[in-house]
Amino acid sequence: KAGVTQTPRYLIKTRGQQVTLSCSPISGHRSVSWYQQTPGQGLQFLFEYFSETQRNKGNFPGRFSGRQFSNSRSEMNVSTLELGDSALYLCASSSSTGSNEKLFFGSGTQLSVL
Amino acid sequence: AQSVTQLDSQVPVFEEAPVELRCNYSSSVSVYLFWYVQYPNQGLQLLLKYLSGSTLVKGINGFEAEFNKSQTSFHLRKPSVHISDTAEYFCAVRRETSGSRLTFGEGTQLTVNP
């Protein structure tokens, strides 16, 4: 069974640009959540989607958005990039939204904003 | 709101020595507790979790953790570490009603030296 796949693995953008990151969950998983990891702020929750609906949202500005498709694949978009958006973005999937459900993480997309 | 404090940012140990990584949490509601490991250039992998029941939880790779409600702690232990245990370890909590939303600690870098 394939794991959580995130593409691309690395990305370099400049300030002001926008970026779209993709996440394919484990087959059969319907919940996808996103996290930002930086050396200064650590791991922070961005949002969670289940069956194409956003179920939870973290404390990030509106420049960060996401969506989920009918096949459970998810994308997150960051508009008007800032230097501080440089981070490892991790996607995780689970079979449901229960708090005791095991999360499976992808290897992440490393975004560098110049 | 919940918060997690990992008391040591770096823990160097020698191979075959015991190790304890400390984690304290704060929450006004019931939470589930987790330990994750992150190897370089990889995503997070679940080591173990505490949902309810026995306060001593055993996980993968010989790790175990003890939940102490009165001290609001969830320390991770291993009786004998290997070089391959070198990684960053994250303690996390999740509210029973918050779906996949995890609150992470700052992480502890465990370095096992020969």
Image (cartoon, rainbow, N blue to C red):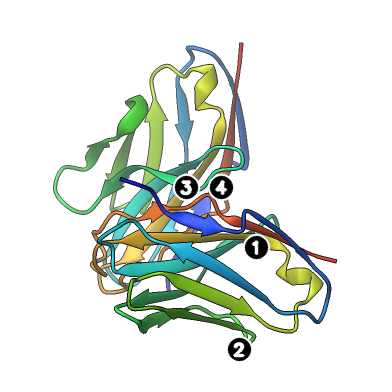
Residue drawn at the location 50% of the way across and 26% of the way down? B85
Mark 2 to mark 1: distance in Å?
18 Å
Mark 2 to mark 4: distance in Å?
27 Å
Q: Which amino acid does label 4 sit on?
A: Gly
x%, y% of residue B53?
A: 14, 48
Q: What residue type is labelled 3?
A: Leu
The chain containing the residue under callout 4 comes to B
Can you identify the residue that label 4 sits on?
B107
The chain containing the residue under callout 3 comes to B
Mark 3 to mark 2: distance in Å?
26 Å
Q: Please tell me whether mark 3 sits on a helix, a strand or a loop.
A: strand
Can you identify the residue that label 1 sits on?
A41
Can you identify the residue that label 2 sits on?
A62
Mark 1 to mark 3: distance in Å?
17 Å
* In this picture, residue B84 sits left or right of residue B46: right
- Callouts 3 and 2 in the same chain: no
The chain containing the residue under callout 1 comes to A
Mark 2 vs mark 1: which is more N-terminal? 1
x%, y% of residue B74?
A: 36, 46
The answer to which quarter of the image holds residue A88 is bottom right
Residue B70 to residue A95: above or below: above
The answer to which quarter of the image holds residue B40 is top right
